Image (cartoon, rainbow, N blue to C red):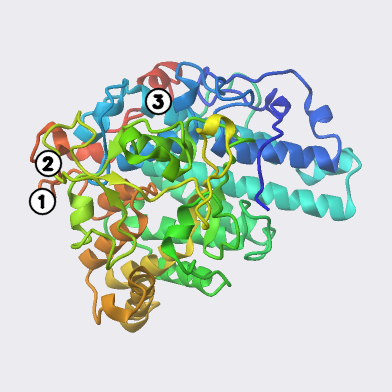
Amino acid sequence: MKFLYKTLLCSALVGGAVSCTKDLDLSPTNSITADIAYKTPADYKQVLAKVYGSFALAGNNGINASDLAGIDPGQADFLRLFWNAQELTTDEAACVWNDPGIPDFHNLNWTASNVLLSALYNRSLFHVTVCNEFIRESSDEKLAGRGIGGQDAEEIRRYRAEAQFLRAFQYWVLMDLFGNPPFVTEKDPIGKYIPPQIKRADLFAYVESELKAAEATLAEPRKNEYGRVDKAASWALLARLYLNAEVYLGKGQGRYNDAIAYSEKVIKSGYSLMPEYKHLFLGDNDVDNPEVLLSINYDGIKTQNNGGTTFIINAGINAAMNPSSFGIPNGGWGGNRATKNLPLRFGDYSGKKDKRAMFFGQKIEMDDPSVFTDGLAITKFRNITRSGAIVPSSGNSFSSVDFPLFRLAEMYLTYAEAVKRGGTGGNEATAVAYYNKLRERAYGNASGNVTAITLSDVLDERGREFYWEAHRRTDLVRYGLLTSGSYLWPWKGGVKDGRGVSESFNLFPIPATDLIANPNLQQNP
């Protein structure tokens, strides 16, 4: 059974969910005090639903409400904003829409006034604020003061550790995308507090320490509810953090031995690959899923949202593609598709050899970026069950496909890349074996196996394995290819054949509105 967010409390935000800037446009919906909101152990789990729900939903009151002001609620959820920033900026996706902020991504020419970047920044800080409040209200002192002890207190301490992880994850997002964000924790004053700016290296150390501090209290691997954090998810985020350490800390400060150690902890923790790749992205992917370490959970009836996987599916198809076959009979927005670099990465992209290749269309070239049928559509995510049935949803438009934030496959390739980058805690033979595990699943046999790999091979394999899963921008930055003129894709930099751009676009800018509101902040280069 998936952990859903159908009952959300915003009462926990009062007093605690103050802006991380001067305002942050937060919109609490009531004024229930914390002592009422956290009165019983059951109340704590209700508020925990809001902590998790901040990933999946735009707000508390349906599809037309948002926790953030100044942006359409349909664009205001975390995953849609994060996906746009991680995919539309790369060779994996381009969008035909001309909505404010959208063309800037693939053209690599955004500014500090980009409305979608501002919304993502504020969404992550909002989630940090929600986590801060839960952590503040679940201290041992608070529990004792409310007469909560014994097994109930132990369970709430686990909730608290999960909130610590979720806060660390959002600080990783801010560190990865924005570098040097404002920094606030549960220890800071409540009210109109103007937080300091934290340096990227210091935030790296903080995220690392928070994950290690929470680890002992988290559930053992595969022992928590599906969609909630366990120790393996924490190890996976540490492995991802360490793999990118030279980006965050500077050249020569790699942590590849640690990336190997923590990826291997996940690999040996009891998770296993889903036997069929396509089953990872269906409407019943919460059933018997041994691979996903942590997901954002969706339900087409209980958690309606025009973001999330509803957005990924609808924006990736149009009416000519038979929306019913994607489980959304009334859907098909005709927005996002792939540049030719993605299907060509598979060689034969028919899906007959490598079953991960899931494309639709006749024209691989993108002569006109405003035409949806220029470039192939992606058919990876489908709101149907393994038996082919449509998963019910309100209005036949919403998705129940859960989105994987972390899955075991990433750890295999993290280990392989860390070894190729010089990590001495692993070995080449094991790296090749892990690499081949994904190839064997993709091909259905050993025909795709290799005997040796290079760093470039690992990047290409990551592209085949994780396309449209919001990894690509981070990967290209780590490889020095996002802005470089040495690797091009159609319309990179706003020209048909692609071009290199300034290295400053490896990092998103601090939003202009926050620079005005918070005098402690300095803009990224």
- Circle 3 SS class: helix
- Image check: 455 left or right of 240? left
Residue 34 x, y percent position in the rendering: 78, 28
Answer with the quarter of the image where residue 224 lies.
bottom right
Q: Which residue is rendered at x = 51% and y = 17% of the image? A: 69
Instruction: Name the residue nearer the viewer: 330 or 422.
Output: 330
Which numbered circle lies on residue 486?
Answer: 1
Sequence-earlier tag: 3 or 2 = 3
Asked whether disc 2 touches disc 1, contact meaning CB atoms under 8 Å apart, the reply is yes
Q: Amino acid at mark 2?
A: Gly
Residue 107 visible, this angle: yes
Q: Which residue is rendered at x = 13% and y = 47% of the image? A: 488
**Name of the residue lying farthest toward the left:** 497
Q: Which residue is rendered at x = 68% and y = 39% of the image? A: 49
Mark 2 neighbour density, 10 Å: few (under 14) some (14–19) many (20 or more): some
Q: CA distance from mark 3 to mark 2?
A: 25 Å
Q: Amino acid at mark 3?
A: Ser
The residue pinned by badge 3 equals 118
Sequence-earlier tag: 2 or 1 = 1
- Image check: 350 left or right of 269? left
In the image, residue 73 above or below residue 92 = above
Q: Amino acid at mark 1?
A: Ser
Sequence-earlier tag: 3 or 1 = 3
Which numbered circle lies on residue 500?
Answer: 2
- Circle 1 SS class: loop
Residue 108 visible, this angle: no
Residue 453 x, y percent position in the rendering: 24, 74
Residue 219 x, y percent position in the rendering: 68, 61
Q: CA distance from mark 3 to mark 1?
A: 30 Å
